[in-house]
Amino acid sequence: MKLTFLGTGTSCGVPTIGCRCHTCSSTDPHDKRLRCSALIETDATRLLIDCGPDFRQQIMPQPFRKIDGILITHAHYDHMGGMDDIRPYCQFGEINVYADPLACQGMLQMLPYCFAENRYPGVPAIQLHEIHKHEPLRIGDIDIMPIEVMHHDLPILGYRFGNLTYITDMKTISDEELPYIEGTDVLIVNALREKPHHSHQTVTDAVLFARRVGARQTWLIHSSHDIGRHAEVNAQLPPDIQLAYDGQVIEV
């Protein structure tokens, strides 16, 4: 199984519009961060985690083949604002989208024309599936365990795939969830910046969480321009906890 980071940035992306800070002015491609999304793939199955407003740009360099399922973490625009752009993949059949009840409701509100009784030709063909924390599912040959984290006071989903756990937009996590993460070998988790934020982890928070989980390797995502330049941040982090970058591929 492999994971491709399609986007590792926060809701505004990096560079941020109108900003000329040290990070936004960087010419290093590692400092260009689209909104958070990832592909999980085996030889037989292909899953997308979140489908934000940069989806079209993110997916164009990837081989064009069926997407077997889209896993939504939560109903914020930067995580599902690109759903209309999945329409070319509907030539393979309906797109199965998996989300918790809140995100399902958000999908219905954001894309009402996709769920109308009389849909006009060409709209994305979406089959929406309501899922819940701790209720495992299997898509193709990939087993998935949804877990719950808190995005300030909003419960959202993270996902475990075998020895890999993917979490974004987390501020806190309850002790109840930790058994579902135990034994994680590769951890992907959000780290917005170093300055505290009301709904996101800081870099320090993410490092402490990684140590609590005990993963062999941790990759940090959902990072803003305030975090600093990729190379400089990674030089200060432990080798087993590093910033991910757009286009990076890891084998699990």
Image (tube, grey):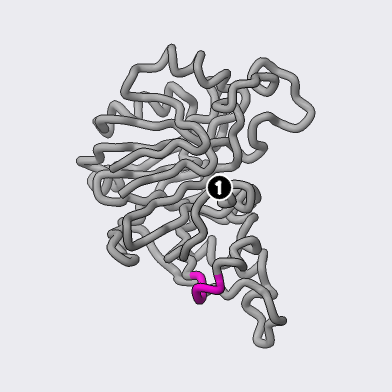
Question: Which residue: 35% across, 31% down?
Answer: 218
* Nearer to us in this view, 48 or 72: 48
Q: In this view, does 117 lie to the left or right of 240?
A: right
Question: In terms of secondary structure, where does tag 1 sit?
Answer: loop
Q: Is residue 251 left or right of residue 36?
A: left
Residue positioned 47% across, 47% down in the render: 38
Q: Name the residue under label 1.
A: 61
Residue 107 in picture, x, y percent from top left: 60, 65
**Does the segment drawn in magenta span residue 5?**
no
Range of magenta residues = 90-95
**In this picture, residue 20 sits left or right of residue 158:** right
Placement of 213 over or under 73, stated as above or below: above
Looking at the image, is 149 positioned above or below residue 146? above
The residue nearer to you, when weighing 215 against 154, is 215
Q: What residue type is labelled 1?
A: Pro
Please say if 144 is above or below 150.
below
Q: At which x and y percent is residue 233?
A: 49, 17
Give the crowd class for mark 1: few <14, some 14-19, many >=20 residues within 10 Å: few
User: Which residue is rendered at x = 58% and y = 47% of the image?
Assistant: 58
Residue lying at the far bottom of the rendered structure = 118
Q: Is residue 76 left or right of residue 205?
A: right
User: How far across and down, in percent of the image, does residue 152 sit?
Assistant: 52, 41
